[in-house]
Amino acid sequence: MAVDLLLGLQWGDEGKGKIVDVLTTSYDVIARFQGGPNAGHTLEFEGNKHVLHTIPSGIFHPKAINLIGNGVVIDPIIFKKEIDNLAPYKIDFTDKLLISKKAHLILPTHRLLDAASEAAKGKAKIGSTLKGIGPTYMDKTGRNGIRVGDILAADWEEKYQRLTKKHLAMLESYDATVEYDLKSMENAFFDSITALRTFKLVDSEQYLIEAQKAGKKILAEGAQGSLLDVDFGTYPFVTSSTTTAAGACTGLGVAPNKIKEVYGIFKAYTTRVGSGPFPTELFDEDGETMGRVGNEFGATTGRSRRCGWIDLVALKYSIHINGVTQLMMMKGDVLSGFKNLKVCVSYNTPEGKMDYFPYNISSGIEPIYEELPGWKEDLTKMTFADEFPSNFQHYIDYLEKALETPIKIVSVGPDRKQTIFR
Ligand code: IMP
């Protein structure tokens, strides 16, 4: 059986958690393939609102197996908190949550290094979530990291001490001071390692090979967004993992020819949290309205998100890099009430007009817009596409044509039920 893949096409926060939760009923396994607790996947159903950081978004469904893949970096302290927060749902994690032994661990000192690195950058800071993501992936590629499977070995604490010692020495080299109480961080860390050992730690690629052979339906869940990809994003203002489709191959051990549907999720406008270029960013009342109506605050950090018009240059780029086969448009409801909507179709750059996403979008880029008529109607109570006001339908048709990809799901609110299939 093939593997389907779901990922964000913008700068993250597109609503992946909600859609995975909606789609889970059609899948046997939901597998997270990259990122870590920098992610905040928000799910709303039956009056509950829940934010997941490390645990895949299929955890609330009775049957689906949830797997944290080798490409994910895990902070055991945050993971334990997530598990504790799920207590009211009485989920039996025994067979429902599997963790790759090859996933890397975020140590307390990774978080300190992240803080020091950002502080030392001053105004050029990335706007990291400060969860230790960058330093952990650096240790992974530098072949110094500690993996989940290591916590089962007798010499694990020695390994931990060696790496921590190295980190503390590195910390001294930064042109920034970070206050910390390592002892209390370590107490929480070792408690959570004890908790982590009680979960099923597996060779996740082997599990997925067998699941595929057994005809199980697998959905690979991405985190962050394509424009935060370490290679294809707005470097250096990116995260440290491969957020694009290729990340599912390296982060789960799924072969490229086994991937079938690629679901690309995007918002009807654009948001970004943290620093970095954002050509269609708005600094006016329209941007403020999007942020307020769309409740655009980071699910992990609470920071307000920057808002702007939809950018088709960026979306086309993401669609191509990921091989997107179906689109899902989120938060169309937030745009109700705008008289006109702007859609960025190309960029004016110092080198002339450009209709692709270039090496550098950090300076001198002016978006070129087309305008479409807005709609007034509240979309949030709608349940079928034939209820859509004609201008909203026109917006969808316009995007579908420009992006040359069908929009299969339109989300009109945060709840599971506010999801319209086309
Ligand atoms: P880091 O991955 O925490 O180091 O953050 C690097 C950049 O990616 C920062 O601009 C963050 O704001 C952004 N980022 C990381 N994770 C997410 C996410 O899940 N949603 C949106 N932005 C994110």
Image: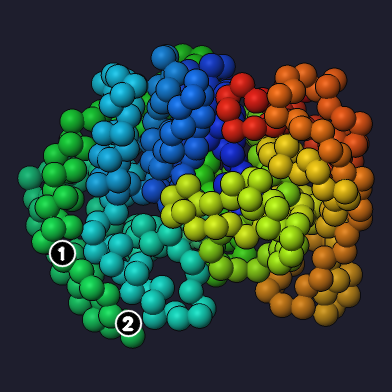
- Whichever of callouts 1 and 2 sits on the residue coming sooner in the sequence is 2
Dividing the picture into quadrants, the one containing residue 327 is top right
Q: Nearer the viewer, residue 72 or 407?
A: 407
Is 357 or 328 nearer to us in this picture? 328
Identify the residue at horizontal 77%, vertical 19% (top origin). 384
- Between the residue at mark 1 and the residue at mark 2, the CA separation in whole angstroms equals 17 Å
Q: SS at mark 2?
A: loop
In the displayed structure image, the side of residue 154 where residue 392 appears, left or right: right
Please, is residue 188 above or below residue 329 in the view? below
| Relative image position of residue 417 (x, y in whole percent) | 61, 21
Residue name at image x 68 percent, y 74 percent: 362
Can see residue 110? Answer: yes
Q: Residue at x 34, y 21 (%)?
A: 89
* Tag 1 and tag 2, C-beta contact below 8 Å: no
Nearest the eye: 372 or 119: 372
Instruction: Name the quadrant of the C terminus.
Output: top right
Q: Which mark is residue 182?
A: 1
What residue does disc 2 label? 176
